[in-house]
Image (cartoon, helix red, strand yellow):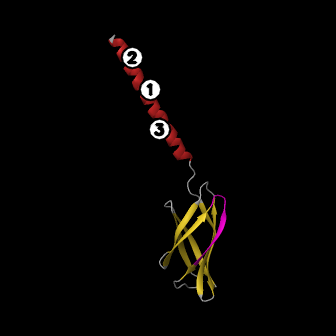
Amino acid sequence: MYRFFAIAIIISVAIVVSVAAAWWIISTQLTVMETPEALRVIEVAIHAQADKWVLKLVVLNEGFKSSEIWRIEVQGVEAVELSEVVKPGEQKLVEVELTGNYAQGVAYTVKLYTKRGNIIPVVASVQG
């Protein structure tokens, strides 16, 4: 009689452990297989246009999910908040009007901040 209960308990524990292990393996695989945000800046430059500065970026989303750029920072000069969504496979031109003082021929580090918490640094040169 006790042998029956012992076998039933051992089988129950084995089933619970195997279900938990299967769930852990599946959730780990889904996390690993998920493609992270993959934004790539193809072109970047700061141009002078009619007494103002404009940052021009060409951004390509190589991932499988949409990415939203919520902030662009020109390091040491200024930061601009915006909302630009780049869909998967899309190449998008992003133009941002700048208010800081820039010198021609100087290179600035520009950081793109996405809603998922990624920071994409690029170097932009100032062109007349």
Task: Return the x and y of residue 2 as percentages of the image width and height.
Answer: 32, 12
Disc 2 packing (10 Å; few <14; some 14–19; many ≥20): few
- Label 3, on which residue? 24
Q: Which residue is drawn at 64% across and 63% down?
A: 60
- The type of residue carrying mark 2 is Ile
From which residue to which does the magenta span run?
A: 87-96
> Mark 3–mark 1 contact, CB under 8 Å?
no
Q: What element carries label 2?
A: helix
Task: Return the x and y of residue 85 as percentages of the image width and height.
Answer: 59, 64
Instruction: Identify the mark nearer the N-term, 1 or 2.
Output: 2
Q: Does the magenta stretch include residue 71?
A: no
- Label 1, on which residue? 15
Q: Is residue 55 above or below residue 40?
A: below
- The type of residue carrying mark 3 is Trp
State the residue lying farthest toward the bottom.
51
Disc sitting over residue 7 in the figure = 2
Q: Which residue is drawn at 50% across and 41% down?
A: 27
Gap between marks 3 and 1 measured at Cα: 14 Å
State the residue lying farthest toward the left.
2
Q: What element carries label 1?
A: helix
Gap between marks 1 and 2 measured at Cα: 12 Å
